[in-house]
Amino acid sequence: MNLKRFFPLIVLFFSGLVYAEQAHLIMATGGVTGVYYPAGGAICQMMNQGVKQHGVRCFVESSRGSLENIKRLRAQEIDLAIVQSDWFMHARRGSAQFKDYGAFDGLRKVVNLYSEPFTIVARKDSNVEKLEDLKGKRINIGNPGSGQRATMEWLMGVMGWWKSDFSEVYELDSDDQAQALCDDRFDAMVFVAGSPNSSVKLATTDCESVIVPAASAKLEELISRSEVYVKTVIPGGMYRGNPKDIETFGVYANLVSSEDVDEGMIYALTQSIFEDFNVFRDLHPALKLLSREEMLRSDKVSAWHAGAQSYFETAGMPKP
């Protein structure tokens, strides 16, 4: 018997038994080497500490990213997801990759999480020093279904690029791309993730890769008019061999749910995050700089879950 194939079946079987025995929330996140997965684990850890009080257990699952998470949430296969704020907007409106699905009117935000800079990582010997240098290179644009892939396709549209403008195009998952970069399978990879990120750390530590600015006049103009994209910086010194601040753009990671998910459960989840807020922030470096105010920051496309809003009101927090 192939044990590698058998073991996940055991896990799924017993997880299914646990799901059936008690009230639960299932959260889809991202690849295990990214930030969504451990951030989701931190949220579930906080909620599960109070399971005797509220009776709800939280489970975290890895996934291929934002687009897959939203589709699964819409199909009611999961209860929670971490997604990029730009794809939250497109799903709500039924635009871009969600055009064929129509607007997901029931999609709801629970809280904002950390900012996610668009990160270009290139081999030191690739001669990629700025955004425009990617043209003609071998590049990993991310797997279909991931937020990084969708954002890269948006950027390609902004820059007037097609896949044929690159010498080779790869579609590796975020878990596999750093090692492939170090193995010289391609010249550069892109990632949309909170910092610090283990995939970027691997690429900058194991093969001395460099982080490339994602900035251009055309891009800056569009960002200034955007509802979700913001200018941001990857701090110098965060990754080995990259001592200077790197200009880029980014989005926010959002914890989202559906209006069909029980209000009391989402209330308990939100309460578990904020009542021991300092403990929560200590669970992962990407959560360190979170503030209550930023987590409740609203925008033109936000539609908040009733359970989260109920907690904000009870706790005397500003209504988003």
Image (tube, rainbow, N blue to C red):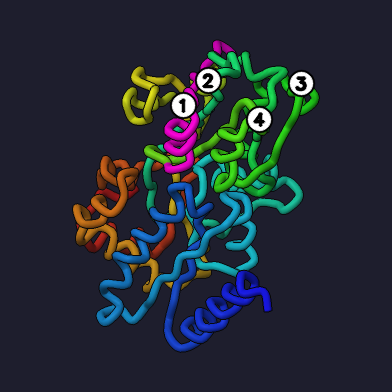
Q: Which residue type carries mark 2?
A: Lys
Dot 4: few (<14), some (14–19), or many (≥20) neighbours within 10 Å? many
Identify residue for label 2.
124
Residue 50's x, y, as percent?
Answer: 26, 74
Is the residue under label 2 in contact with that under label 1 (CB below 8 Å)? yes
In the image, which disc is placed on residue 50? none
- Kindly identify the residue that appears in the image at 44 percent across and 70 percent down: 59
**Which comes sooner in the sequence, label 4 or label 2?**
2
Residue 64's x, y, as percent?
Answer: 60, 53
Identify residue for label 1.
208
In the image, which disc is placed on residue 165? 3
Question: Does dot 4 land on a helix, a strand or a loop?
Answer: loop
| Front position among marks 4 and 3 | 4
- Kindly identify the residue that appears in the image at 44 percent across and 24 percent down: 231
| Front position among marks 2 and 3 | 2
Of 10 and 292, nearer the camera is 10
Distance from the alpha carbon under mark 1 to that under mark 4:
14 Å
Dot 3: few (<14), some (14–19), or many (≥20) neighbours within 10 Å? some
- Is 217 inside the magenta-drawn segment? yes
Of 200 and 220, nearer the camera is 200
Distance from the alpha carbon under mark 4 to that under mark 3:
15 Å
Identify residue for label 4.
186
Residues in magenta, as a range: 198-218
- Kindly identify the residue that appears in the image at 43 percent across and 43 percent down: 198
Question: Does dot 3 land on a helix, a strand or a loop?
Answer: helix
| Front position among marks 3 and 1 | 1
